[in-house]
């Protein structure tokens, strides 16, 4: 007498189909000591809605001919999420995040707003998922669905690709140390700023502004250097180059 599915939420309310023989006229289906609601029945099957419960319980079917042998049904508690490895990423998706918590071993879906990803279960306390593409830049709720139910409580921010419109001042000495304000769009998740490929210290001011300090040139000589800003969604280069200018000599 198979039962399908053989596990479900401890809150109950799940449709379960029990198959076997001589099941017509079923008068009761017990999940442990709790009665299930019979929704369909014929000689070879009984369909029920599960009652609430916990742990592993025996399932039996009672007909006018008696009570069947028991089958085990496993109640699964709702999942709990304790953290996301990353709370933001590119609008195009494709990056993999790790979700930690408890009760995740039966995870079958991770929802990012209206979009869904199929997770990889690492353990009961960890799953990974490739983030699906977002519909628009901004925050969406993240939920995990398991055999025990769905858990919400986290948000994920989709970030659009950055642009760099300009910067000021336009020049500075080859020794570096010039404070440069870079303007553009979608800069709030800036990960790095480079001048001619050399990393520069920076501070994010807003989504449209980043402050950086020009690094020394690699050879101490003057010349142009392209400014590039890299965010969680990609990289953008300024339309003109920063000019390293030699100081005066007499």
Image (cartoon, rainbow, N blue to C red):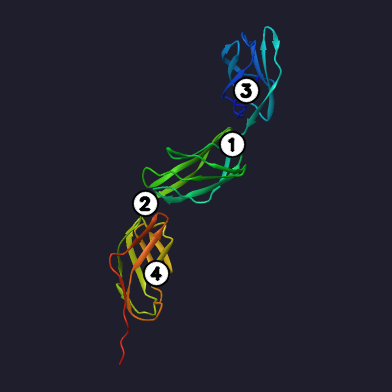
* Residue occupying image coordinates x 69% and y 28%: 56
Residue topped by disc 3: 3
Mark pair 1, 3: CA separation? 18 Å
Q: Mark 2 = which residue?
A: 160
Nearest to N terminus: mark 1 or mark 3: 3
Badge 2: residue crowd in 10 Å (few <14, some 14–19, many ≥20): many
Q: Earlier in the sequence, mark 3 or mark 2?
A: 3
The residues tagged by marks 4 and 2 sit, at their Cα atoms, a distance apart of: 23 Å
Number of residues whose C-alpha sits closer than 10 Å to that of mark 3, classed few (under 14), some (14–19) or many (20 or more): some
SS type, badge 2: loop
**Which residue lies under the disc numbered 1?**
106
Which element type, helix, strand or loop, lies under badge 4?
Answer: loop
Question: Which tag, 4 or 3, sits closer to the chain's start?
Answer: 3
Q: Is residue 150 above or below residue 217?
A: above
**Residue 110, percent from left and from top:** 50, 40
The label nearer to you, 1 versus 2, is 1
Are dots 1 and 2 in contact, CB under 8 Å? no
- The residues tagged by marks 3 and 2 sit, at their Cα atoms, a distance apart of 47 Å
Q: Quadrant of residue 135?
A: top left
**Identity of the residue furthest to the top in this view:** 64
> Rounded to the nearest whole Å, what is the CA distance between mark 4 and mark 3?
62 Å
Q: CA distance from mark 1 to mark 2?
A: 33 Å
């Amino acid at each position: 007498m198979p039962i399908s599915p053989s596990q479900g939420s401890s809150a109950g309310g799940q449709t379960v189909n029990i198959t076997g023989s001589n099941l017509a006229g079923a008068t009761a289906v017990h999940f442990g000591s709790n009665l299930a609601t019979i929704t369909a029945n014929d000689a070879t099957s009984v369909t029920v809605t599960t009652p609430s419960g916990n742990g592993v319980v025996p399932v039996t079917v009672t007909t006018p001919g008696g009570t069947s042998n028991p089958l085990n049904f496993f109640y699964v508690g709702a999942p709990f999420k304790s953290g996301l490895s990353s709370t933001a990423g590119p609008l195009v998706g494709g990056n993999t995040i790790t979700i930690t918590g408890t009760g995740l071993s039966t995870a079958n879906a991770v929802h990012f707003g209206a979009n869904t990803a199929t997770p990889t279960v690492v353990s009961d306390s960890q799953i990974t998922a490739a983030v699906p593409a977002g519909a628009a830049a901004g925050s969406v709720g993240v939920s995990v669905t398991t055999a025990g139910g769905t858990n919400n409580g986290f948000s994920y921010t989709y970030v659009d690709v950055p642009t760099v419109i300009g910067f000021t001042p336009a020049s500075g000495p080859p020794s570096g140390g010039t404070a440069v304000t870079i303007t553009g769009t979608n800069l709030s998740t800036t990960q790095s700023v480079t001048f001619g490929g050399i990393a520069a210290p920076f501070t994010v001011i807003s989504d449209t502004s980043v402050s950086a300090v020009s690094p020394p040139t690699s050879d101490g000589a003057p010349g142009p250097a392209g400014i590039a800003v890299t965010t969680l969604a990609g990289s953008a280069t300024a339309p003109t180059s920063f000019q390293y200018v030699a100081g005066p000599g007499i």
